[in-house]
Image: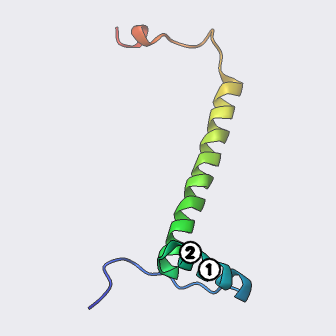
Amino acid sequence: MPAKNPRVNIVLDQALYDVLGRLAARDGISMSLEARDLIKEALETKEDLYWDIVAAERKRTYSAKKSVAHKDIWK
């Protein structure tokens, strides 16, 4: 039966493979699930960093003189 989710093959150095195995054993899940969860966390962290940059740029370029009040937008 084919897998329902797409798959990715990766090559790890021995030290990284060993750490992944220990984390998976500690959490009682497969190495694949552990790797998936770690990738999700990394992507969320990168997304947070991206939005921090966007917010900092908006804060830097914000001008109260050019802003429009919420109530004025819906007139």
**CB under 8 Å between discs 1 and 2:** yes
Image location (x, y in percent) of residue 41 = 56, 60
Tell me: residue 49, above or below residue 58: below
**The disc labelled 1 sits on which kind of residue?**
Arg
Q: For mark 2, does the 10 Å Cα neighbourhood hold few (<14), some (14 to 19), or many (20 or more) residues?
A: few
Residue nearest the viewer, comparing 69 with 39:
39
- State the residue at coordinates (59%, 75%): 23
Tell me: residue 41, above or below residue 73: below
- State the residue at coordinates (65%, 21%): 62
**The disc labelled 2 sits on which kind of residue?**
Arg
Furthest-left residue in view? 1
Q: For mark 1, does the 10 Å Cα neighbourhood hold few (<14), some (14 to 19), or many (20 or more) residues?
A: some
Tell me: residue 66, above or below residue 53: above
Q: Which residue is mark 2?
A: 26
Element assignment for label 2: helix
- State the residue at coordinates (52%, 72%): 27
Checking the image for residue 22, the label placed there is 1
Image location (x, y in percent) of residue 53 = 67, 40
